[in-house]
Image (cartoon, grey):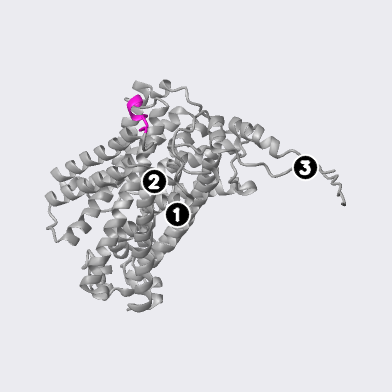
């Protein structure tokens, strides 16, 4: 037998730490069931992002303000949020822990900074839960032939919230299953229907996406196009939810970054098919652009699918809305749990409890259902509250996102090299800078006051955000929740070094010598 002598000393590629070992380095114990696969995690983020919900809600507004070229905002915002998702991917790969935005901001910067980021983010999420359930109630009313009144909207909204809560309480496996069903409904409702409309029901030429159709009037089209930015900005968030349930995912340091990127890419393609299909299949596009047809999608579906097809689409749409509410509740509850586990909220011991059987933060889930239900009751009492309550949500989401992006950039300037298995390498700094530049651009667009002449209507986005920031700052400096926790903070560089020097990695990285 010939024995080959190997004299070179090539370091083996370091092995990934086990999920429990990784958590121990971060200061936590592995206390959840890791039953969520890559695809279930992707489904959670995708159904939260929900291109079906986003496109349906903004289709008429986008065309009225920016005309058919407003579709390009889906591409612009998708590219920008892809940069953000890559930054998040490196962060979650080093910190695969529950809560997403909050623990990331804390470990990258500090407790006060993280507390404010999470405070803004949790309220934006809770309001979004209410809004999605409210909009979904319209589909349910149409499907069952219920008159769309304030009373019916309230009861259907509460019903959607309760059904989502019961599914979430049953455990992570059921969350993953329903999320996958929601994913299928989304793909059928946006890609399947979009392709059908594009291929078989096209009434416009593809050149229509470069035709402003006169929306600019006597002014510049740039102004009109910028005004239509909501077509994309309202759509591309939800991918961060993949990281909110990190401790319930197998091999999260590798899988979650992939799931977040997939959410953006598949969500963007889905939204393009859906938006484009509706535009090309519209029997009277000019009426939509001029604002004469304020709710055009039902008419488009009726004319292309017929009454039975339109009913089937309503079933698909309701499934997608319910799955979106489910994903939002799950993400919000994990953030509350993470916040409470570190002693940063009133009632933190109650909120941080995990059920024995299903291994879910049941009390945090109850809060993530109850508060949106209370907001729904307020909307029932005064329907005009829905827009003011939800207007700040998207800007709040973007503010929280960019607080993490900024904190990540700050650590890079201090010498941080992310130590998770997902890494951008030498491109990390470039991508981080580009993500921050995009985020600032998006926030400026979202915060720009309107021009209706009504001060409350024109400034409502900044008013809403100001209220949340103001109350958060008052609580932070009066109650000092940051002093209630001794959880690690600002330790990105130290943790990276400890991960790289962990015995499991150093043993795997020792040179291989065969004699």
Q: Is residue 109 left or right of residue 46?
A: right
Q: Which of 179 and 98 is in front in this view?
A: 179
Residue to which mark 2 is pinned: 173
Q: Distance between the residues labelled 1 and 2?
A: 20 Å
Q: Which SS class for mark 3?
A: loop
Residue 512: numbered disc: 3
Residue at which label 1 appears: 263
Is 342 rendered above or below residue 372?
above
Give neighbour class at mark 2: few <14, some 14-19, many 20+ (Cα, 10 Å).
Answer: some
Q: Where is residue 22 in the image (x, y as percent from the top left)?
A: 56, 35
x, y (%) of residue 225? 38, 62
C-alpha gap between disc 2 and disc 3: 41 Å
| Secondary structure category for the residue under label 1 | helix
Find residue 241 and report its image quarter.
top left
Residue sitting at x 22%, y 64% = 294
> Answer yes or no: do the residues labelled 1 and 3 have beta carbons within 8 Å?
no
Q: In this rendering, does residue 27 appear at all?
A: yes
Looking at the rendering, the stretch of residues picked out in magenta corresponds to 348-356
Q: Where is residue 137 in the image (x, y as percent from the top left)?
A: 21, 53
Residue density around tag 3, few if under 14, some if 14–19, many if 20 or more, within 10 Å: few
């Amino acid at each position: 037998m010939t024995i080959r002598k190997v004299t070179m000393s090539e370091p083996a590629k370091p092995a990934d730490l086990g999920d429990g070992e990784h958590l121990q380095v971060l200061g936590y114990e592995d206390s959840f069931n890791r039953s969520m696969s890559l695809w279930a995690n992707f489904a959670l983020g995708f159904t939260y992002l929900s291109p079906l919900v986003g496109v349906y809600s903004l289709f008429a507004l986008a065309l009225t303000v920016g005309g058919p070229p407003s579709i390009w905002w889906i591409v612009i915002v998708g590219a920008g949020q892809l940069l953000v998702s890559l930054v998040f991917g490196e962060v979650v790969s080093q910190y695969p822990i529950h809560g997403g935005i909050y623990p990331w901001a804390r470990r990258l910067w500090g407790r006060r900074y993280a507390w404010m980021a999470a405070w803004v983010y949790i309220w934006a999420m809770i309001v979004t839960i209410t809004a999605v359930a409210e909009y979904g109630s319209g589909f349910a009313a149409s499907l069952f032939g219920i008159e769309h009144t304030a009373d019916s909207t309230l009861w259907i909204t509460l019903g959607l919230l309760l059904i989502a809560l019961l599914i979430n309480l049953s455990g992570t496996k059921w969350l993953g299953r329903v999320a996958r069903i929601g994913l299928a409904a989304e793909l059928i409702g946006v890609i399947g229907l979009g392709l059908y409309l594009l291929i078989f029901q096209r009434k416009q030429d593809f050149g229509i996406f470069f035709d402003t159709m006169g929306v600019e009037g006597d002014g510049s089209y740039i102004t009109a196009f910028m005004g239509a930015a909501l077509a994309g900005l309202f759509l591309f968030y939800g991918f961060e939810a993949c990281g909110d349930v990190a401790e319930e995912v197998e091999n999260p340091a590798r899988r979650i970054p992939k799931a977040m990127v997939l959410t953006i890419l598949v969500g963007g393609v889905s939204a393009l098919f859906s938006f484009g299909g509706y535009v090309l299949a519209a029997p009277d596009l000019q009426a939509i652009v001029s604002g004469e047809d304020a709710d055009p999608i039902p008419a488009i579906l009726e004319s292309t699918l017929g009454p039975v097809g339109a009913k089937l689409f309503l079933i698909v749409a309701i499934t997608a809305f319910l799955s979106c509410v489910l994903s939002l509740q799950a993400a919000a509850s994990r953030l509350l749990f993470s916040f409470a586990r570190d002693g940063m909220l009133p009632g933190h011991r109650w909120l941080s409890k995990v059920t024995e059987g299903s291994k879910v933060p049941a009390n945090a889930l109850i809060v993530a259902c109850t508060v949106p239900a209370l907001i729904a009751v307020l909307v029932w009492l005064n329907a005009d509250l829905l827009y003011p309550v939800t207007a700040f949500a998207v800007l709040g989401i973007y503010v929280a996102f960019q607080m993490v992006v900024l904190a990540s950039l700050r650590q890079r300037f201090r010498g941080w090299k992310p130590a998770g298995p997902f890494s951008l390498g030498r491109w990390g700094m470039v991508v981080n800078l580009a993500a921050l530049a995009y985020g600032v651009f998006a926030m400026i667009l979202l915060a720009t006051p309107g021009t209706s002449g009504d001060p409350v209507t024109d400034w409502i986005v900044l008013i809403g955000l100001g209220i949340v920031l103001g109350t958060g700052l008052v609580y932070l400096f009066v109650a000092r929740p940051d002093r209630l926790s001794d959880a690690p903070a600002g330790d990105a560089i130290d943790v990276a070094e400890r991960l790289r020097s962990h015995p499991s990695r150093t043993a795997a990285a020792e040179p291989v010598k065969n004699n």
